[in-house]
Image (cartoon, rainbow, N blue to C red):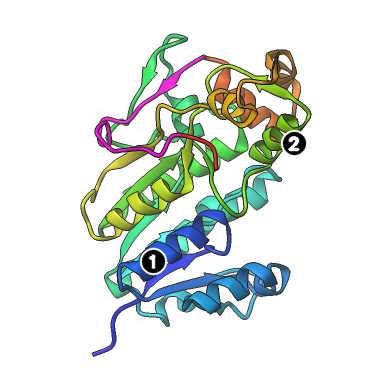
Amino acid sequence: MARAPWVLVGGLGFIGEHLAYRLLRLGLEAVILTRRGSIKRRRRLARRLEKAGVQLVSSQRDFIGEEDIENLSPAVIYHLAGKASGSWKVQWEAHAGLAERVVRAATRVGARIVYVSSIAVASDAAKAPPGEVVTEYDVPPGPQAAFETIHAETKAAGERVVSSSSGKWVIARPGLVYGPGEAHGEVKLLRTAAKLRVAPVSRRVPIVHVADVADILSMAGYGGFDGKVLHLVSEYTLGDLAGELCGGRCLRASIDRLLSLGRLAPRSSKLRLAWSLVRRKYRYRTRVFHTYPWRLGPV
């Protein structure tokens, strides 16, 4: 009997690549399902994945439909699609609209859903005093919650869609992800600054190594955390990474004033998202993984 694949919906990206490799090492069949045209736009990444043994499947349309997912008969569905910026319509489709189709498909085929959200949801929904430690709470924030950014608002909507399903689900909220290969623009900026002997310093921005994200997401696929909301954050911060990339030889430069401009930026922008993460000086922690051996250090 053929093995049921573990399908990464919208997984042709940084986290998706590392998760796919992790699943292959576990002896699982990893399939990345993406929108029409995405493989052509990311040919180099697609070639690496296929060479490693990952199956790539493209929808015949500009969106991923329920039947695209169902046709693969998955055992586990990872919702990895994400937009850090863009219009409400674009972010809603990536975070909530697609989640609705994933839930309907998962219900029909009996698959587990692992929804990759964002720590920004917690930063906006916590409503705790400045400087407090923010850990996981049992359910996603309700529709009455007010959010600083479209990103957090639509990610929270996706969380509600998934958690209200009748099947098995896990919600994971990574901090800023860094590691080998592709990286977020913020991390690339730190590397560039390090070459110029400058270490941008800010309030606490939680970061997590992509290998840890892939490891925990793979565990979630096996059902170890069903019905839980997980914070994937380490004790490492963006400021720590900046300092280590410089090896202690850089001029430390505060960028708090620059980030404070985020309060004036559009809700759809990355600058507003960055400001939402640092404005309350929260320290993000996890109750579930407090003993997990996080990878701490630059790559």
Q: Residues within 10 Å of mark 1 (few under 14, many from 20)?
A: some
The Cα atoms of the two marked residues, 1 and 2, are separated by: 44 Å
Mark 1: amino acid? Arg
Left or right of 290, for residue 283: right
**Residue 29 shows which numbered tag?**
none
Tell me the magenta residue range.
281-296
- Residue at horizontal 45%, vertical 30%? 144
Q: Residue furthest right?
A: 196
| 169 is higher (above) or lower (below) than 135 | below
Mark 2 — residue?
192
65 and 48: which is toward the camera? 48
Would you say residue 88 sits in the magenta stretch?
Answer: no
Q: How many marks?
A: 2
**Rendered position, 297 above or below 71:** above
Observer-nearest residue: 41 or 91? 41
Task: Tell whether 259 sits left or right of 28.
Answer: right
Q: Is residue 246 left or right of residue 77?
A: right
Residue mark closest to the camera, 1 vs 2:
2
Q: Residue at x 62, y 81 (%)?
A: 60
* Residue corresponding to mark 1: 104
* Most common SS among magenta residues: loop
